[in-house]
Image (tube, helix red, strand yellow):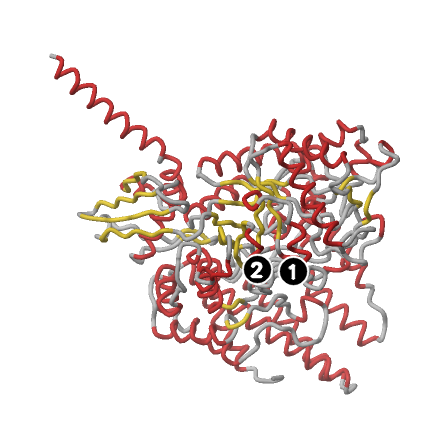
């Protein structure tokens, strides 16, 4: 009898363990169901004990049964994703999923992969201006699924920062009017958080704060469910100027990001050595914890692209004290917290950040309580000149996109090999992670997919094999013409990163842009379109064909505008107007073609913005903010976020260029600034009928553009 009871007890314990494991793997299973579909139910998910500091997974498939084991939830989802890609069953993209799930899972031997990085970080601080400022929960859910499937475990999460800070300002005694003059419109908030600007673009309504708090609760809940650590914003010293009313003796530092903004739009900074700095930091972090719970990582950036503060002491002493007081303030509120800081400035402003200044800034902060995001190694190597940050924790990465620009660019060879080489470099010191920190997402898919794979590779990646696998997973096949197209792209657009790839018609100029305009690029697009008979049923192929032909049309229009300018210089207005008319026709065709692209449409961008309110006036305000960030959001960065979007081309770029040409013909003055502001203030976007068959239209437009050899 006793033996029977023992057997029953043991049996029940085993069943409870099995049930608990299934319950704990549910978040991963839900991601798979949303991305792969109902057949994800047939995947067995199990846990592995983590015997080291980094995540790993293993998958195997036998007799049609796929089993994936891993140490964390996002390692589980990454393990499934790698199995799917390794077996050429598709991929997950911002355009949508492309999985072809068979009735039985193909057999696969036990395959174990370990990420060399404890931290796999995603997003740039300004991604929340150039990409996500108006995303709804539906879009965020898709994004978090993308991050989980690609195996990222640490994400920037500053949503609702202003809602929490507003509570702090009110508790200190500031009025709503004083607080309103401190903030900026939603799409510009990242630069306000870094102390670059204030009081630009309008007043944040209280309903925005309510909306963002609700959204952030959903984002953080899902991140924690998926085993992702959020990087939260903390107090960086920037305060409303009206705080002097409450503390008349307070010493404030005037910031300077760019002289293009007037003094009224430049913030002031409270230095960390002031007791009020520590008080506000604790108030802010306590307020955040009360609303959203605690966190491990807190971002504090006080000198992003700005001049360093001056004082009576050497700058190294000032910086050492700044670092100490900043960390002490964070530690007071949360002893277990880690201070996170961007490393962008160390390369971007190398003259004011020589190695001794960088070392001084972190000299009084414990090595394991600071994390430096050195995410711009495609621009400048910041870590080697400073000895791998002298033992402090740091993250290596790339910023493959600036401002959300849509032109193809990037150094595929560097992306495939740079991180692997760094891992083997003894000078790497206390390297802990890898980062993709693009300012703009939903572009250059091959670049982002490659970098996501880098985060799970110890060694450099073989690009030839990778591009073949990528193409089969993305389009379903890899014909010879597609291989040749990739070979030419690697020699042209993807041979070098161009930080600001802007067509001349996007900036209102007649000069040659830095977008790759080589014969290799044009040939690569022609070869890509020649694959249509085999690949045209693929939605990913359709989207990429539209985009690549669009780039050709944009470059041809650019060439025509250069010829227009040359003709004007020679006083040949007949030729000038002929070329200009042809350029405008090309841009109109480009705009109509892009209307069929799943992502590259101004209407989609504005719809995200207006979804945050049912009030018409607020919808107009949000739409205006959305239009501002992609065009003229500030004097130093107007036309920075150039995007090849339907609606933006026909409503903004074409009319502005036409008025510029008209003024040149009449020798009159075009009030460009007034036109731009009026466009931003108008919340709408005009309608257009897309091509009934966009691939056929793309083929015809490409043929016509390539046959027109003049002007070269």
- The vertical placement of 130 against 241, above or below, is below
- Describe residue 18's horizontal placement relative to residue 267 as left or right: left
Please state the horizontal and vertical placement of residue 591, each as a whole percent of the image. 59, 63
The N terminus - image quarter: top left
Q: Can residue 31 be seen in this view?
A: yes
Task: Look at the numbered disc 2 and give the secondary structure of its residue.
Answer: helix
The C terminus - image quarter: bottom right
Kindly check if marks 2 and 1 are in contact, taking CB atoms under 8 A apart as contact: yes
- Describe residue 82's horizontal placement relative to residue 223 as left or right: left
Q: Can residue 693 be seen in this view?
A: no
Q: Mark 2 points at which residue?
A: 387
Q: Nearer the viewer, residue 56 or 708?
A: 56
User: How many angstroms separate mark 2 from mark 1 (CA)?
Assistant: 8 Å
Q: Nearer the viewer, residue 712 or 123?
A: 123
Please state the horizontal and vertical placement of residue 593, each as a whole percent of the image. 54, 64
Please state the horizontal and vertical placement of residue 283, each as a whole percent of the image. 69, 30
Q: Name the residue under label 1.
A: 355
- Describe residue 244's horizontal placement relative to residue 139 as left or right: right
Please state the horizontal and vertical placement of residue 462, each as a whole percent of the image. 38, 67
Q: Which of 265 and 341 is in front in this view?
A: 341
- The vertical placement of 402 against 618, above or below, is below
């Amino acid at each position: 009898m006793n033996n029977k009871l023992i057997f029953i007890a043991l049996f029940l314990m085993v069943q409870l363990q099995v049930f608990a494991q299934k319950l704990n793997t549910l978040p991963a299973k839900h991601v798979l169901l949303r991305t792969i579909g109902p057949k994800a139910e047939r995947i067995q998910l199990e846990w592995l004990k983590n015997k080291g500091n980094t995540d790993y997974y293993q998958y195997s498939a036998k007799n049609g049964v796929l089993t994936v084991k891993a140490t964390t939830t996002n390692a589980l989802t990454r393990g499934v994703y790698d199995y799917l890609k390794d077996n050429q069953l598709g991929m997950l993209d911002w355009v949508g999923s492309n999985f072809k799930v068979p009735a039985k899972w193909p057999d696969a031997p036990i395959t174990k992969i370990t990420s060399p990085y404890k931290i796999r970080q995603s997003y740039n601080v300004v991604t929340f201006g150039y990409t996500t400022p108006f995303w709804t929960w539906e879009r965020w859910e898709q994004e978090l699924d993308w991050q989980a499937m690609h195996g990222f475990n640490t994400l920037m999460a500053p949503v609702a920062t202003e809602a929490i800070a507003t509570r702090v300002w009110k508790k200190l005694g500031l009025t709503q009017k004083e607080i309103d003059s401190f903030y900026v419109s939603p799409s510009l908030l990242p630069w306000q958080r870094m102390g670059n600007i204030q009081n630009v673009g309008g007043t944040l309504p209280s309903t925005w704060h309510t909306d963002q708090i609700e959204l952030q609760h959903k984002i953080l809940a899902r991140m924690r469910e998926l085993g992702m650590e959020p990087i939260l914003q903390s107090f960086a010293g920037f305060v409303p100027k009206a705080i002097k009313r409450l503390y008349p003796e307070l010493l404030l530092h005037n910031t300077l990001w760019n002289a293009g903004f007037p003094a009224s739009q430049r913030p002031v900074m409270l230095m960390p050595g002031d007791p009020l700095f520590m008080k506000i930091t604790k108030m802010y972090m306590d307020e955040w914890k009360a609303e959203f719970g605690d966190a491990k990582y807190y971002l504090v950036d006080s000198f992003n692209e700005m001049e360093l503060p001056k004082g009576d002491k050497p700058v190294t002493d000032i910086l050492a004290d700044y670092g100490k007081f900043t960390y002490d303030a964070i530690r007071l509120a949360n002893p277990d917290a880690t201070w996170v800081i961007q490393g962008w400035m160390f390369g971007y402003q190398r003259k004011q950040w020589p190695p001794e200044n960088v070392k001084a800034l972190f000299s009084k902060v414990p090595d394991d309580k600071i994390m430096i995001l050195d995410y711009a190694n495609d621009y400048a190597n910041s870590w080697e000149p400073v000895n791998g940050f002298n033992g402090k924790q740091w993250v290596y990465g790339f910023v493959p996109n600036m401002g959300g620009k849509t032109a193809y660019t990037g150094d595929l060879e560097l992306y495939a090999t740079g991180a692997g080489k760094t891992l083997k470099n003894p000078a790497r010191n206390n390297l802990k992670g890898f980062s993709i920190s693009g300012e703009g997402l939903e572009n250059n898919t091959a670049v982002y997919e490659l970098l996501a794979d880098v985060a799970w590779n110890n060694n450099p990646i073989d690009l030839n094999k990778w591009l073949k696998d990528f193409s089969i997973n993305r389009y379903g096949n890899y014909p010879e013409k597609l291989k040749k197209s990739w070979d030419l792209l690697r020699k042209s657009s993807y041979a070098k990163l161009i930080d600001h790839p802007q067509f001349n018609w996007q900036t209102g100029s007649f000069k040659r842009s830095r977008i790759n305009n080589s014969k290799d690029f044009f040939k690569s697009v022609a070869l890509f379109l020649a694959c249509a008979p085999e690949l045209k049923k693929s939605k990913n192929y359709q989207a990429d064909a539209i985009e690549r032909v669009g780039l050709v049309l944009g470059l041809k229009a650019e060439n025509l505008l250069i010829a227009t300018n040359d003709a004007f210089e020679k006083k040949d207005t007949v030729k000038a107007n002929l070329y200009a008319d042809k350029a405008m026709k090309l841009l109109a065709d480009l705009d109509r073609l892009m209307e069929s692209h799943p992502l590259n449409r101004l209407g989609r961008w504005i719809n995200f913005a207006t979804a945050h309110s049912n009030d018409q006036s607020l919808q107009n305000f949000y739409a205006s903010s959305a239009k501002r960030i992609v065009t003229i959001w500030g004097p130093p960065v107007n036309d920075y976020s150039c995007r090849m979007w339907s609606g933006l081309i026909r409503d903004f770029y074409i009319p502005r260029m036409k008025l510029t040409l008209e003024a040149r013909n009449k020798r009159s003055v075009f009030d460009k600034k007034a036109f731009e502001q009026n466009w931003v203030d108008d919340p709408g976007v005009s309608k257009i009928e897309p091509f009934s068959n966009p691939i056929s239209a793309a083929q015809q437009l490409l043929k016509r553009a390539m046959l027109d050899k003049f002007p070269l």
